[in-house]
Amino acid sequence: MKAPGVHPAYVVIAAGVAAALHVGKLSPALPALEQSLGVTLLQAGFLLSLVQLAGMLLGLAVGLAADGLGLRRSMLSGLFLLSLASLLGGWAQDVYTLLALRAVEGLGFLLVSMPAPSLIRHLVQPQRMSAMLGLWGAYMPLGTAVALLCGPLVIALSAWQAWWWGLATVTLGLAWWVWRVVPSDRLRALSSPSAKGSDRRAWILRLRQTLSAPGPWLVALSFAVYSGQWLAVIGFLPTIYSQAGVAGGTSAVLTALVAGVNMVGNIASGRLLGRGVPAQFLLYTGFTVMGLGTLLAFFVWPMAAGGTGLPASVRFMAVLFFSMVGGMIPGTLFSLAVRLAPGEGTISTTVGWMQQWASLGQFVGPPLVAWVASGAGGWHWTWVVTGACSGIGLLLAWRLGLRSKS
């Protein structure tokens, strides 16, 4: 069943990238949706964040039940849900339909992304696991960058509906590829005794161990304050550029570049941790640069919508470093989640708890920034929201440093 030359783990990563395309597909379509459906700025914030609703509600549950649900079956179900919701979304006639379908897409995204690390762990040799999980860590910025780059071109040549339908087709193709290449859950369970599910008392014990330990809470809250500000800034960049009169093609390239460089931080964090750089130092660096980056990018003087800020080139570089250096945070937190999980059997549960809080941050961040921007009449107060997130992140990094040394 396996296609020659294609390792199943790479197919799993490709499926994650396809799911991430649906998270990033909305940003380049916001100007078109504003014209065709009358989407307001606050509604746009909820459209950006509703895709995280399922992760916010079900991340821990899926982390607990990943093996029992069937890893490949979960991924296939998520890809089919994403395809169906995107297909129906192309026929949406109002913003409320899109909002409901974004929630469905969020469930599909969760079903794809949550089992992927465990699936990769089962598919590769132990000596290759770290490298493959490092590649997996870049699935979100890669998918977001591709969406931001290709979306404006597709929308300009046709319409936003074609963008939705095109991604539905791509995702359906990835579902076929996963079905063909990745071994079935039944075959993998027969060859891997560790894949067998545990009884009810065991998962209750895992849940109690995870939620009673401080480590999972610290990494989860850190991921929330990182992901909320990152999605808020990246998600609204096309709108900010459009309001500033930047051409659509130029806006797409600039935004895709900002999202794409996040992969640099993800990959660098793994290498730096492997060379003995303390995780606390990487978190301090990431949150500090994120806070300063948005301060330089959005602060204006005098403090009013019509005030003046730094030159556009300097502000763009600030956002670029915001994303690139901030990318060290998720890679570091995944490493800490493994180290600070209360036991070997609670790693997936800890990752699920972290995903749940990351989704909460991404659910709250964009509407909060949109609300502040709407009330202020511009984006010049954005740095206050992101700076507060970075400040909380620095405090959590301090606590994580104490935990990792104990």
Image (spheres, helix red, strand yellow):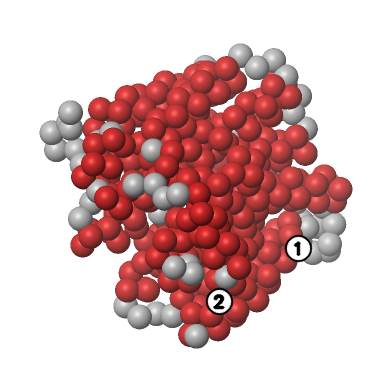
Q: Mark 1 highlights which residue?
A: 384
Q: Position of residue 155 (x, y in %)?
A: 54, 24
Q: Position of residue 57 (x, y in %)?
A: 64, 44
Q: CA distance from mark 1 to mark 2?
A: 24 Å
Judge whether residue 243 can be spotted in this image.
Answer: no
Is residue 316 shown left or right of residue 369? left
| Crowd rating for badge 1 (residues with CA inside 10 Å; few <14, some 14–19, many 20+) | some
Nearer to us in this view, 284 or 63: 63
Q: Position of residue 234 (x, y in %)?
A: 59, 48
Is residue 346 shown left or right of residue 34? left
Q: Position of residue 36 (x, y in %)?
A: 70, 19
| Crowd rating for badge 2 (residues with CA inside 10 Å; few <14, some 14–19, many 20+) | many
Nearer to us in this view, 153 or 76: 76
Q: Amino acid at mark 2?
A: Leu
Nearer to us in this view, 371 or 156: 371
Judge whether residue 13 can be spotted in this image.
Answer: yes
Give residue 44's mark. Answer: none
- Give the residue displayed 42% in from the left and 50% down from the top: 198
Q: Mark 2 highlights which residue?
A: 400
